[in-house]
Image (cartoon, grey):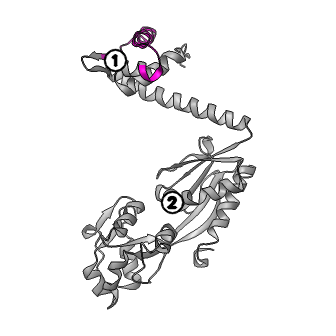
Amino acid sequence: MYHQARLPSLKALRVFEMAGKLGNFSDTAAALFVTQSAVSRQILLLEEELGCKLFVRERSGVRLTAIGEDYHRKISKALNDVGVATTELKLRIAGMNILRVTTLPTLAMQWLLPKLPNFKAEHPQIAIDLSSSDDLIDLNSGYMDVGIRSGHGQWPGLEATHLFNEELITVCAPDKAPAFARGLAAGFEKVPMLHTTTRPFAWQSWAEAHAPDIIANTSQLAGYQDFFITIQAAILGHGVAIIPSFLVETEIAAGKLIDPTGKKLQSKRCYYFVTSRMNTNHPPIAALRNWVLACCRNIPSSQHR
């Protein structure tokens, strides 16, 4: 078992974190409103306490040692966590509730983020801390409160509320749509297929359902890592993309994109509002869940159970 070491001073750690980020003691001193000698003294005291060199002094500034880089990465995260926790505490003292929400990057940018001002107007006492990631987050750890994710809806220890089913549609810039007036085969001869690499079989499934004479070989398609980039490529006229319909509501309404084929594909994916079972009835979480469910009512009924 490890014995907990005596913690270095917070002042020294703050100086170390800033110096590691800036790579220069003069810049660090200016950023922290102290003298350069004060920065050097704090770093020296920290190195003496830890028993190792954290920086290599160079003519142009300073560079973290290998052990210093590892320590800097961990200290930066720890100081950020302290800052976040302190901000949350102050907001709660002021009567605010903070919900940490994680969701998929494109879902966050294209669907949830534009709607959040409405939630804020309805619930001014609840602050949303939104992060986006493709990774699954352990909601039982307490690091995040809510996840909006696609999947099967069965996650151990978690409460999942079904939001909607996914429907895929084809989209392209308006000037590309006339190519499909004489049929799908003629259209796809002129307009390249754009494909999102996280959905390698989407075009193949769509072609099997609506245009079996079209070959959708993903190795020959222009590929992008997420839907947001694929959407932008379609807007720029690079080709026709296959996209979940709820992600392009705004672009279609604004006339930036059009569905040139009118052929939809029901995906096997569903979206869920997910929390730990322990927190599922927490009033701010319940308020957010009800609001998200209300937003989902605008999605066509074919995408609901």
Type of the residue with mark 1: Phe
Q: Residue 222: horizontal and vertical position, in percent? A: 28, 66
Residue 91 locus on image (x, y percent) = 68, 37
Q: Residue at x 41, y 63 (%)?
A: 227
Q: Is residue 246 left or right of residue 182?
A: right
C-alpha span from label 2 to label 1: 42 Å
Magenta stretch: residue 67 in it? Answer: no
Q: Residues within 10 Å of mark 2 (few under 14, many from 20)?
A: some
Give the residue at mark 1.
55
Horizontal side, residue 228 vs residue 81: left or right: left
Mark drawn on residue 18 = none
Please, is residue 108 above or below residue 12 in the view?
Answer: below
Q: What residue is disc 2 on?
A: 107
Q: Which residues are magenta?
A: 30-56
- Residue 230 lies left or right of residue 244; in this view the side is left
Q: Earlier in the sequence, mark 2 or mark 1?
A: 1
The kind of secondary structure element at disc 1 is strand
Q: Nearer the viewer, residue 153 or 184?
A: 184
**In the figure, 156 relative to 6: above or below?**
below
* Residue 29, horizontal then vertical, whole percent: 42, 18
Instruction: Look at the image and say whether residue 46 sits in the magenta stretch.
Output: yes
Q: Residue at x 64, y 50 (%)?
A: 157
Q: Main secondary structure of the magenta part?
A: helix
Q: Is residue 214 visible?
A: no
